[in-house]
Amino acid sequence: MKLNCGKHTLDLSRPVVMGILNATPDSFSDGGSYYAGGALNLDLVLRRAEQMLREGAAIIDVGGESTRPGAAPVSEQEELDRVVPVVEAISANLGAVISVDTSTAAVITASAAAGAGLINDVRALERPGALDAAAGTDLPVCLMHMQGQPGSMQQAPHYDDVVAEVGAYLRERMRTCEEAGINRARLIFDPGFGFGKTDEHNLALLRHMAQLAPADIPLLAGLSRKSMIGRLLQREVDERLPGSLALAMLAAQRGARILRVHDVAATVDVLKMQQLVDNPNQ
Ligand SMILES: Nc1nc2[nH]c(SCCc3ccc(S(N)(=O)=O)cc3)nc2c(=O)[nH]1
């Protein structure tokens, strides 16, 4: 299973790690690490990206809009100002697949032109213009399920059958993408852990993740340091590494091919062990 990510090819024959690089001043976990005195510090950004690549990340995920629960919307210009310089800097200085975590058409287009290799949209290209912008880039697209919007999605999540409904949504978005000229070979599915889900919903989606995508569509899982770990284990954000690693391994065993994480080196080690035990001949 290979993905053409602009000038890079991503081999997904075994699970890979996507390192999180929050280009937002209020990120939920490594809050605003790259803003000194209000301005984005590209030196700090490059150092963090370099460290994640050294630790074994196959992808660097750059986001300019905080989409954690309760997050306020960000203007298109603000998102462009945060994301494009980071994509340009990493693309110019480091050879890596850069995914851009955005739902905004202008950011998709500008990031692709700046060297991004993957579009990671938590709104599955539903925003106006996003579908056509993505179609125009030839890049792979991660389609993620979210119920509601970040400002209110965690107030009262409800499903009759969360696995069936999330699976049906992703397949419907795939059909829409194919009609817009985005070949299914470019698509990645993601259940959207924590995006309009209770802990029970998240656990059911993890248990049955393999059902969500056809065999030829890779799955992405973003569980790292999320609040379900905090509630189920009674752990603060900076104490969630064991829970995050356990969920990364469990997701990989249930078919996830891309793990979106904060702690790259630890997750790379866990996935290596998982592969040695579960797929000895690979
Ligand atoms: N494809 C993909 N992209 C992602 N981008 C993000 S940003 C995290 C936003 C957040 C933080 C915390 C909670 S919570 N309430 O569960 O702790 C929810 C959402 N996540 C994902 C994810 O999963 N996939």
Image: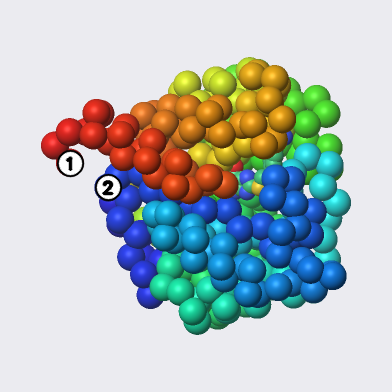
Which residue corresponds to the image point at 32% horizontal and 50% vertical from the top-left?
12
Looking at the image, in which quadrant does ligand 1 appear? top right
* Position of residue 269 measured from the top left corner of the image (x, y, whole percent): 37, 41
Q: Quick one: label 2 or label 1, which is nearer the N terminus?
A: 2
Whether residue 138 is visible: no
- Amino acid marked by disc 2: Ser
- Quadrant of image for the C terminus: top left
Residue 242 position in % (x across, y down): 53, 29
Task: Say what secondary structure mark 2 lies in.
Answer: loop
**Number of numbered discs overlaid on the protein picture:** 2
x and y, in percent, of residue 233 in the image: 64, 19
- Looking at the rendered structure, the secondary structure element under dot 1 is loop
Q: Residues within 10 Å of mark 1 (few under 14, many from 20)?
A: few
Residue 208 in the image: above or below residue 89: above
Residue that mark 2 sits on: 13
In 3D space, how far apart are the residues under numbered discs 2 and 1 (Cα atoms)? 9 Å
Residue 45: x and y in percent read 62, 68
Q: Which mark is residue 141?
A: none
Q: Is residue 87 visible?
A: yes
Few, some or many residues within 10 Å of mark 2 (<14, 14–19, 20+): few
Identify the residue at image location x=46%, y=23%: 208
- Residue, x 45% and y 41% (percent of image)? 266
Q: Is residue 37 above or below residue 214?
A: below
Q: Is mark 1 within 8 Å of ligand 1?
A: no
Q: Nearer the viewer, residue 98 or 26?
A: 26
Amino acid carrying mark 1 in the image? Gln
- What residue is shown with label 1? 282
- Which residue is depicted at the point 31% across and 40% down? 272
Q: Is residue 231 left or right of residue 115?
A: right
Q: Are the residues at dot 2 and dot 1 in contact (C-beta closer than 8 Å)?
A: yes
Residue at the limit of the structure toward the left, as seen here: 281
